[in-house]
Amino acid sequence: MRFKDYWVYAFSALLRIKLRSSLTIAGVTIGIGAMVLLVSLAAQAERAVVTQLQNLPALRTISVFSPRLVQLAKNRRDPGAKKEALKLPTLDDAALDKFRRIPGVTDVFPNVNIAGDCKLGKVEERVTVTNVSPGVTAATVKGSLSDGGFFSSDDAREVIVPSYLAHSLTAGKGSLVGQEVELSYFVFDKKPGQDDFKVERKKETFKVVGVVKEDGSIDSGASAMYFSLPSNAFVLPEKQALRLLKIVPSAGMLDPSSKTKGQQYLIVSVIVDDPTPQAVKTVRDEIKLMDYPTRNLWDLIETLQYLFLGLKVMLGALGSIALAVAGLQIINTMSMSILERTREIGVMKAVGARNRDIRRLFVFESMLIGLLGALAGLAGAWVVGRVMESVMFHLVIQKFMETPEKMTLFYIPTWLLGGALLFGVGISLLAAIIPAHRAARIDPVYALRRE
């Protein structure tokens, strides 16, 4: 028999048992539809999160950590950890010069992340003092500020704060721009060669010149570290932040007596000109060869992709339970079809049909059920998804959002389309193995005697 003949025969066989074949196809449709709907929900969640992260400026930023800091953090309870940490390379000005010479690097600057308190009148808030990234100007931050402007100079005693901090300090009454706020922080006075140190609290005043709006951000040491500007950031001009960094070292993390070239740092940002994963990886590999630990936004994206992969597998397995039931339905349909067509099988064998021809007839019939069910399931999943999105928009989004926008809840990528079709046909093939084998083994003499 020709390939075309198998399909024609399978289609005609299903038409003879319309009700039974329709119910079996419906079972496959429900199974495929449920699986596609659940997996597409996870696929859309992944696409929304990853796309948002890929648009962040921090994608071009590689955070380089002091090897000593990492060693001490891993072995905090080990008495000999400090001695071992001091054998590791220091993250100093000499290291920064090496990073700048790496091809593809456009800028290198230390991250300032100092814990402190900000006070206005009787209101006090915990803040993270950080530095504005080099190259940031009034023009680049204009669209991110809800009030005020940029620093007047690199060493001005001025500060830019997020809207959340500004609202907390003023209790939502009036503007914070133009007011003087008090910053307090701790200084560790440690002499070379001694383990003991003194703790002293210092206070300084800074003039608020700008407020970052809720959905805005500016490139800073904190945004490079946390991938976005923290709500408690206290952003200072570059020179002012570096001045504080020199007088506020982390106790026990750095050794003032070590022979290093210039200032030591805990974290440094390395900016690359190309944000693609391969370009970032190339620069990171160069830095790792120097024994410096690194981190980048691509690490988070890769981790999220693995998590979403697990979620998609779990949801797909949950949806495929209905498809497994449909597979049992196919076995039942094929078995009943064999009983009803025993004489027909005997006639085909009597006129020269071989066992493999009989086997293929039932396999193609089962494949047709799986193919039709998979196509109907994909179409059904798409329709149900659009209906659920419309219901979500009219019942929830329009009522609770000031500027309602239609949102996509389900995303069916190409691999899911192909995978659903192959999965549907594959389940049908597995379900056809036993019935097709039984049909091929029927004795033609016995089949012709049967009424």
Image (tube, rainbow, N blue to C red):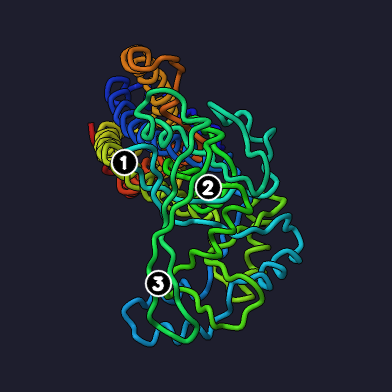
Q: Nearer the viewer, residue 92 or 308?
A: 92
Question: Which of the marked residues, 1 or 2, is nearer the chain's N terminus?
Answer: 2
At 58% from the left and 45% from the top, the residue drawn is: 157
Identify the secondary structure beneath mark 3: helix
Question: Which of the marked residues, 3 or 1, is nearer the chain's N terminus?
Answer: 3
Amino acid type at circle 2 is: Ser
Q: Label 1 to label 2, Cα distance in Å?
A: 42 Å
Q: Quadrant of residue 239?
A: bottom right
Identify the secondary structure beneath mark 2: helix
Q: Residues within 10 Å of mark 2 (few under 14, many from 20)?
A: many
258 in relation to 385, above or below: below
Q: Nearer the viewer, residue 74 or 114?
A: 114
Q: Nearer the viewer, residue 198 or 16?
A: 198
Q: Quadrant of residue 142?
A: top right
Residue, disc 3: 73
Left or right: residue 325 compared with residue 238? left
Residue, disc 2: 223
Does residue 147 appear in the picture of this structure?
A: yes
Q: Label 3 to label 2, Cα distance in Å?
A: 22 Å
At 50% from the left and 43% from the top, the residue drawn is: 229
Q: Residues within 10 Å of mark 1 (few under 14, many from 20)?
A: many
Return the x and y of residue 18 as percentages of the image width and height: 32, 20
Tag nearer the camera, 1 or 2: 2
Q: Label 3 to label 1, Cα distance in Å?
A: 45 Å
Label 1 with label 2: CB-CB less than 8 Å: no
Residue, disc 1: 320
Q: In which quadrant is the C terminus drawn? A: top left
